[in-house]
Structure formats: structure tokens, C-alpha cells
Image: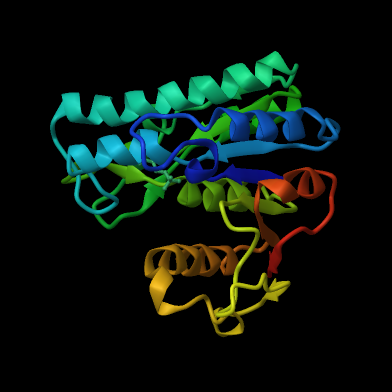
Amino acid sequence: MVLKLGGSVITEKDRPETLDGPALDRAADALAGADRSRDLVVVHGGGSFGHHRADEHGVGVESGTGDAAAAFAVHGAMTTLNRFVLDRLHDRGVPALPVHPLSAAARGAGGELTLPLAQVATMLTESFVPVLHGDVVATAGEGVTVLSGDEIVVRVATDLGADRVGLCSTAPGVLDGDGEVVSRVSSLDDAALGGSDATDVTGGMAGKVRTLLSLDAPAQVFGIDGLGAFLAGESPGTLVD
Ligand code: IP8
């Protein structure tokens, strides 16, 4: 299974490079309690680490930078966050290993992503828990661009044939126009996806739902309260299939 830990779950989104320590502890506790006989790949987002630096240097998914120092600043913020995640997992005996996409991935001029995953597959057969993260990635004609954790989740789930995908977000699931969690979404029309006062959040969630609908594996969107249940094979939050 593939689990995305949203960057805004494990960091304080409004304060540059600030961890949400209690939230990360809760996530690490849940991962430590997970059934270790099942394959698990973790991907985390950027939160106030990657996004802050990417904004500062004007690097996005489509527009890149040829400035190595800027690229390294964004990548460095992400590896710092990745180290925090790894440390908390190791504190609890989770056999986690880091996988940094910048060192392996590339994007072509048409946007197509190459992301070799043999190391991730072998880590799984050796009972490790690979922990990837959103990153910058060398991109033909752009220098480096941002590679989001969501795109990594899709690629890992597809190429490694994941049986389930989980997205741990700041919301308890996909919300309807009244702010209630929708139990199942099978098309973008199923979810009213919020009101006009929450355009960013809704836009973000709509994009995630669209991405998850394209997966073969069933996906679950839930908040941190649902993480333990998801790892135990239950279906917290919203099922997207
Ligand atoms: O939070 C973004 O990953 P995301 C990574 O999953 C960077 O979109 C470098 C901003």
C-alpha cells in the first residue's frame, strides 16, 4: 500500500520550515503500530518546507529554475523534512529508508516523468519502509521543476501495483458543500466539493480526487484521526474509486 502524508498535516503550513511535531508524532505512532507483514511505501509532501522555498525561488510544477543554488535550497528543505520524518519513524522502530526523487527522476520536455523504482521494490522485499517526498526534478528545457508528492504516489502505486492508496490530509475526507464527509466518490460529479469561501482548499482537493480517480487501486482520503484505521485495513474518510 502507498500512504501520502500531506505536507500540511506534518508541518505548520503558515510558518516557514516549521514542523508540526505533535502531528508527526501521531503519524509515526500510527505507522509504528501498522501490520509489518504488508508492503508500505510512504510519500510525504512539502508543507512549509518545500513550498516555502519553492515560492521564494519562483519554482513551480511548470516553470523551473536553472539556478543550482535555488534548486538545492528547495531540495535541501525537503531532505530536512524527510530526515525529521525518518528520525521519528526510527525512534519507534519503523525500518524506514529515504528515497530522494531528485537523484533518480527526470521530466521530459513534454512533462513526461521518468522515475525508476527498482530500489523501492527491492527495499520492500527486504522489509524496509521506503519514504519518498515531493522534490525538485531535472526537467528538459526548464532546469528543475517541482515534482509533487501526489504525482509520486500515482507513479509508485501504478508501477508497483499497490493494492490500496491512502491520502492523509488536513480534512477528514472529501467534503460536500455542507462540510460533511462524503463516504464514496466515483466521479468528480459525486462530490459537490465545497463552497466559494474555500476555493484553494477545494481546488486542491478536487485536483487530488481527479488524480485518485485515475488510479486502478482504491484510494482513501482521511484526516490524521483516520490514519490508524487506514493502516489496519479499514476505510476511514472517503473512498475514491
Ligand atoms: O506537497 C511539493 O510536494 P507536495 C514538494 O506533495 C515541493 O505537492 C518541493 C514543493
Q: Measuring 56% from the left and 85% from the top, which residue is drawn there?
A: 189
Tell me: 192 left or right of 163. left
**Image height of 171 relative to 18, above or below:** below
Residue sticking out furthest to the left: 67
Q: Ligand 1 is in which quadrant of the figure?
A: top left
Q: Measuring 47% from the left and 51% from the top, which residue is drawn there?
A: 151
Task: Tell me, yes or no, if residue 122 can be seen here.
Answer: no
Q: Horizontal and vertical percent for residue 153?
A: 55, 48
| Camera-side residue of 44 and 201 | 201
| Camera-side residue of 60 and 140 | 60
**Image height of 110 relative to 209, above or below:** above
Tell me: 139 left or right of 215. left
Q: Horizontal and vertical percent for residue 134?
A: 43, 39
Q: Measuring 67% from the left and 51% from the top, which residue is drawn there?
A: 166
Tell me: 86 left or right of 94. left
| Camera-side residue of 205 and 125 | 205
